[in-house]
Image: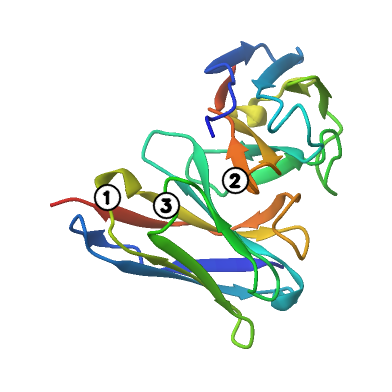
Amino acid sequence: QSALTQPASVSGSPGQSITISCTGTNSNVGTYNFVSWYQHHPGRVPKVIIYEINRRPSGISHRFSASKSGNTASLTISGLQTEDEADYYCCSYSGHTNEYVFGTGTKVTVL
Amino acid sequence: EVQLLESGGDLVQPGRSLRLSCGASGFTFDDYAMDWVRQAPGKGLEWVSGINWSGNTDDYADSVKGRFTISRDNANKFLYLQMNSLRPEDTAFYYCVKAAGASFSGTYFDSWGRGTLVTVSS
């Protein structure tokens, strides 16, 4: 399957909100609720920040929220902080092929 | 604390084989599915393979199907990835990943290792 489509980069000033889109197809995002988001600081281990479309793991800031509409999932970071500067990847399960497909990745820059 | 430690990454020639290992600790290993996810230099994440808690169900990305084999040793808490017929496009950091549930179908990845680098080049 082709990678889910994300914008290559998104930027914002401290305190602002930004939204990252993740567009798939009816074979993955559009059909399944197993959409997750991962934060990856270069040189560090990727970390899950959202699972099952909009659920936050324990310890993840409430500034991270997410949703899904049709074939597109979205991640919103509110009250942007310098520590949020990282790469973000969406991921969807595809039951049609019993596999996972990641997004192309979005680099978030805090201006 | 969950810890996943990969090993086995190396520089290999195209067509050769390599086996990656991942030692797990800090959780009940045989309660969870495990996966391998890779990241080529400068590229995004790509799911490679997953295996359920018992090892009797697994699946692969089309890009590695027929060449890679995932397996696990629950007694010793190890996950493996046997990689055959390696290609230059398999060059990547390979992450050992813990799934949030017992099945690798319909879950998410809640813990990641630091990765091991596989370079396929002549």
> What's the chain of the residue with tag 1?
B
Inter-mark Cα distance, 2 to 3: 22 Å
Residue B87: image tag: 1
Q: Where is residue A39? Give x, y as percent.
A: 64, 37
Quote the CA–CA distance across marks 3 and 1.
10 Å
Type of amino acid under label 1 = Arg
Q: Nearer the viewer, mark 2 or mark 3?
A: 3
Residue receiving disc 2: A46
The residue lying at 18 percent from left, 58 percent from top is: B13
Q: Are marks 2 and 3 on the same chain?
A: no
Instruction: Say left or right for B111 vs B86.
Output: right
Q: Residue at x 59, y 86 (%)?
A: B76
Q: Nearer the viewer, residue B34 or B41?
A: B34
The three-letter code of the residue at mark 2 reads Pro
Disc 3 or 1, which lies upstream in sequence? 3
Look at the numbered discs 1 and 2 and tell me whether their residues touch, using CB distance below 8 Å.
no
